[in-house]
């Protein structure tokens, strides 16, 4: 997403960042190199093709929350899919539907970041 890199840099100074993507091995091979600089902000990247679970399934969110090790209500989840946002909210995460970087910037500002 154009403009996301500086927001991730800012957020990473204040919060641990994690990513969760519904993806397959060929896509991972591509984005791992094409976006290595941006991906470096994340402590861990959860990949559906690796964990065997996909958004918006409840078990997928439960797996990620357990792996991160904090209560779901302390996790802010960003996604461009309304279905994924609804699934995250159903599991107790704070979920933000992202249609542009403005949505991310606004949420970070609300968090004082």
Image: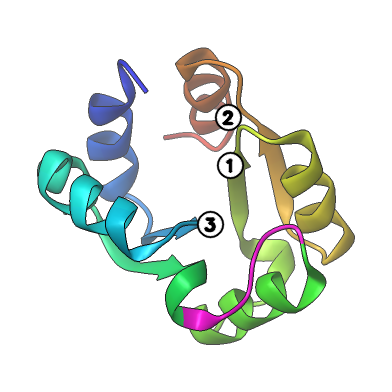
Is residue 82 depicted above or below 73 in this figure? above
In three-dimensional space, the C-alpha distance between marks 2 and 3, rounded to whole angstroms, equals 23 Å
Secondary structure of the residue carrying numbered label 1: strand
Q: Residue at x 28, y 49 (%)?
A: 12
Snapshot quadrant of residue 80? top right
Is the stretch drawn in magenta largely helix, strand or loop? loop
In three-dimensional space, the C-alpha distance between marks 3 and 1, rounded to whole angstroms, equals 14 Å
Q: Position of residue 11 (x, y in %)?
A: 34, 41
Secondary structure of the residue carrying numbered label 2: helix
Decide which of tag 1 and tag 2 comes sooner along the chain: 1
Dots 1, 2 in contact, CB < 8 A = yes
Residue designated by label 2: 107
Is 70 or 82 nearer to us in this picture?
82
CA neighbours of label 2 inside 10 A, class few (<14), some (14 to 19), many (20+): some
Which labelled disc corresponds to residue 22?
Answer: 3
Q: Position of residue 42 (x, y in %)?
A: 29, 58
- In magenta stretch: residue 54: yes
The mark closer to the camera, 2 or 3, is 3
Is residue 93 depicted above or below 46 in this figure? above
């Amino acid at each position: 997403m154009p403009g996301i890199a500086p927001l991730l840099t800012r957020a990473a100074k204040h919060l641990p960042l994690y990513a969760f993507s519904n993806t397959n091995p060929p896509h991972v091979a591509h984005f791992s190199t094409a976006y290595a600089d941006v991906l470096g902000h994340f402590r861990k990247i959860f990949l559906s093709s690796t964990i065997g679970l996909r958004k918006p399934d409840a078990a997928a969110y439960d797996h990620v929350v357990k792996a991160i090790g904090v209560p779901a209500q302390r996790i802010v989840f960003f996604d461009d899919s309304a279905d994924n946002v609804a699934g995250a909210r159903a599991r107790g995460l704070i979920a933000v539907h992202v249609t542009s970087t403005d949505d991310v910037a606004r949420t970070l500002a609300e968090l004082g970041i």
